[in-house]
Image (cartoon, helix red, strand yellow):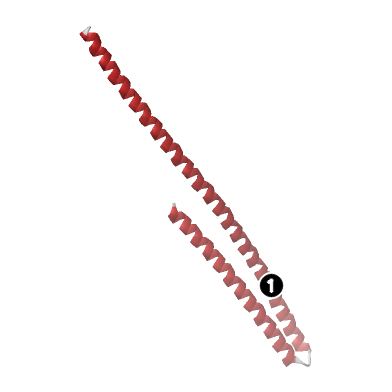
Amino acid sequence: KRREAKQAARVQELLELLRQAASTAEEESAHAAATIEGHVGTIDAHEEQNAELIGEVAAAKEASEGVRDALQHAEARALAAEASLAASSSRCQLAEEAAAAEAAARDKAEQALAAQNAVISDVASKDQARVEAT
């Protein structure tokens, strides 16, 4: 009987160890699930930020192409105005108009390119901040 009592006590000890191990496993599993859920949330937020940044870059690229086209048209107009000056008796006036149009077009192109560079820099800063945050 004494032996049976010892065995029963040992079985009880083992059962208690198993209960503790199961409890610990449940806690660790819950913690792991919460951690994974947090990571999934972070990934979703990064994907959303990436989509926004891609949109901003696409818009900046489109604006840049528009500026490039406008600059080419302005240069073509300036060349046409120069050709017209050669044939015209009012060369001085046309030259001033062409120079002003070209300067205005270049100013607009420079402003647009500066704005594009600012957007690209902002996108890069946001991306760097996002990378550093993770």
Residue 38 in the image, given as x and y percentages of width and height: 47, 44
Residue 48 in the image, given as x and y percentages of width and height: 56, 51
Residue 50 in the image, given as x and y percentages of width and height: 55, 53
Check disc 1: other Cα within 10 Å, few if <14, some if 14-19, many if 20+.
some
Q: Amino acid at mark 1?
A: Ala
To which residue does mark 1 refer?
Answer: 70
Figure quadrant of the N terminus: top left
Which residue corresponds to the image point at 49% horizontal and 48% vertical from the top-left?
42
Residue 91 in the image, given as x and y percentages of width and height: 74, 91
24 left or right, relative to 39: left
Of residue 113 and residue 69, the one placed in the foreground of this image is 113
Which residue corresponds to the image point at 33% horizontal and 23% vertical from the top-left?
18
Q: Is residue 17 above or below residue 29?
A: above
11 left or right, relative to 94: left
Which residue corresponds to the image point at 39% horizontal and 33% vertical from the top-left?
27
Which residue corresponds to the image point at 25% horizontal and 12% vertical from the top-left?
7
Dot 1: element? helix
Of residue 82 and residue 59, the one placed in the foreground of this image is 59
